[in-house]
Image (cartoon, grey):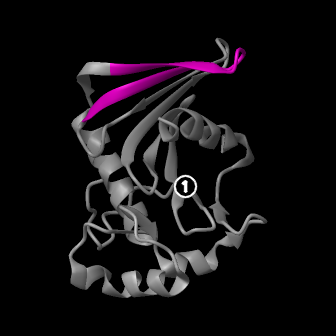
Amino acid sequence: LVSHDAEPARAAGGGATFVSVDRGGALEIGFRLLRVGPGEWRGYVVTAARDALFRLVRDEAARRVELTATAGATPEWRLRWVVDLAAENYEEQTLAPGEPIAEGDFAELTALADEFAAEWLWFASAPAEEIAVERQRFERLGYPVREANVRSARLRTMEQRKDGGYLTSALDEADHWVKEVLEQCWASD
């Protein structure tokens, strides 16, 4: 994971947010999503151990989704999953060499990632003086510190799940498939 600035970056146009934390305080998956055109979404996704920028293209007629992701915050697409929605399976590819991300698109995605991180996350790799309070709060809650962590103030605003974990979602009903694709392909990798 790459450390993100603690200050909010330029506004990246909002977007829908989804965050899920297990009962032990580990970030299962969090992302911010923007719809950028018919059948195309872009965003930032993070777990307790890694993060990436991503692009999703959905072809309804072919019943197919293509998920492309970076390896961290590099300005190139490095991983691709082609999902067959009818057969409910996918094929994973490593892109070597990676495919460059257009400079404007990369700037927009980086701003989106920075904005999401500033609102929701703190990173173990940040300077000790910047995260001292969060470390203390996690210690009091009995949560181990991981590479990426949800801010304790945000945990208090999240809905508590039946299993003791936490959840927040601002996804439109029509966009819940995005979470499933990210979990099954990128997060399970």
Q: Main secondary structure of the magenta part?
A: strand
In the image, residue 86 lies in the stretch drawn in magenta: yes
Q: What is the three-letter code of the residue carrying label 1?
A: Glu
- Horizontal and vertical percent position of residue 66: 51, 23
- Horizontal and vertical percent position of residue 88: 69, 21
Horizontal side, residue 37 vs residue 44: left or right: right
Look at 30% across and 44% down and name the residue there.
72
In the image, residue 135 lies in the stretch drawn in magenta: no
Extent of the magenta region:
76-94
Look at 40% across and 87% down and name the residue there.
136
Instruction: Tell me if residue 50 comes above or below residue 131 in the rendering.
Output: above
- Horizontal and vertical percent position of residue 132: 31, 85
- Horizontal and vertical percent position of residue 68: 42, 29
Horizontal side, residue 145 vs residue 105: left or right: right
**Secondary-structure class at tag 1:** strand
Instruction: Tell me if residue 73 comes above or below residue 39 in the rendering.
Output: below
Q: Which residue is mark 1?
A: 28
Instruction: Tell me if residue 2 comes above or below residue 60 in the rendering.
Output: below
Look at 40% across and 19% down and name the residue there.
93
Residue 23 image-quadrant placement: bottom right
Q: How many marks?
A: 1
Residue 96 image-quadrant placement: top left
Q: Residues within 10 Å of mark 1 (few under 14, many from 20)?
A: some
Look at 33% across and 36% down and name the residue there.
70
Please name whichever residue, 46 or 119, is drawn nearer the observer in this view of the structure: 46
